[in-house]
Amino acid sequence: MICKSVIAAGVAGFMATVSNAAEEKIVIGVPAWPSAEVTANIISMTLEDKFGAKPELVQRGTLTILNQVGQDTIQIHPEVWLPNLETAMARLEAADAAVHLSPKGVDAAQNICASRETLEQTGVGSVADLADPEIAAQFDSDGDGKGEIWIGAPSWSSTAIEKVRAHSYGYDQTMTLLEMPEAVAMAAVDVAASLGRPIVFYCYAPHHVFKLHDIVTLDEPTYDAAKWKMADRNQDANWIENSMAATAWDQSHFHVGYSASVKDRPEIAGFLDNIAFKPDDIVEMSYAVEVERIPAEDVARAWIEANQERIGEWTK
């Protein structure tokens, strides 16, 4: 009788723990780029299916998501890009609001790109060339004498860094720095490629644009930590002038980030730590969302269905 009581109590306790874990809030931030929209949905659906959780997806800028993960008002960031968010990560850690990063990241790259035809038409070959008024003028589409370059979406962490890079190289004086949603910018790349017009833009990989068009990266000096300094724009009104980035980006990568409260749920933290997307996965996701116009939720559902074995490995 005692054994049965102990067993019953143990089972009841276990079920209560599972129930409480499922009922606890898990908010997943959704940044404004296509692969993150899909990976956020994959994480959400898996948490619900495998762990009985009831996640909530919220769209925010990437830095806002990161800060709120540090505050535990959002629990998961699906794609924390580094080195983009290193300054913010350090600030959160110093404030005892550290964000935990999964150990299995995706290798990435960030550059300034152009179509191969653009190089042949304009003579541009390096990022520094954009500071040459004669070369920059060849990217002028509105007649103001300055060229245009897309540097990213307003909510991206990379966009602020590209402002610093433009200032460091000097092409903030010869080019208008355009900030707009990625879908709009990629549509402009499509049009330029189809009409044979010159275009130059911020690019990152893995990304489907390299699959669609003959895209090349502009030359620049190899990354040099001594020439790369980022002031915290949340604490320095003159952060652009007090920053420096006159070399190529450092090797980039991105990881799932999650809050301290998630670490208290080892089964969920273990799943997040095991997530291991491949660059080809990311390309396929962005292609499906931006080119095929498939909703991110549907792309995520199809990806899960096609990758049950991998999901099983991540959640075991």
Image: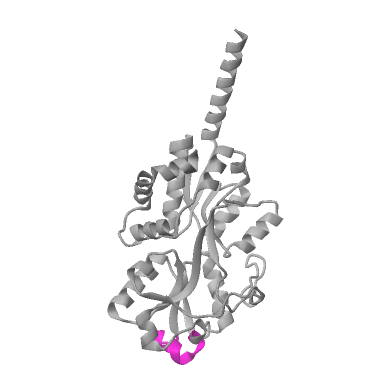
Report the residue that reaches farthest toward the top. Answer: 1
Report the residue that reaches farthest toward the left. Answer: 195
Q: Quadrant of residue 279?
A: bottom left
Q: Quadrant of residue 136?
A: bottom left
Residue 219 drawn above or below residue 21: below
Residue 87 in picture, x, y percent from top left: 64, 63
Residue 41 in picture, x, y percent from top left: 43, 48
- Let me know if residue 258 appears in the view: yes
Q: Nearer the viewer, residue 2 or 142?
A: 2
- Give the residue displayed 59% in from the left and 42% down from the top: 262
In magenta stretch: residue 204:
no
- Give the residue displayed 31% in from the left and 58% down from the top: 293
Q: Nearer the viewer, residue 201 or 74?
A: 201
Q: Nearer the viewer, residue 208 or 294?
A: 208
Residue 312 drawn above or below residue 137: above
Residue 256 drawn above or below residue 263: below
- Let me know if residue 55 appears in the view: no
Residue 305 in picture, x, y percent from top left: 35, 44
Q: Quadrant of residue 36?
A: bottom left
Residue 278 in picture, x, y percent from top left: 45, 56
Q: Which residues are magenta?
A: 130-146
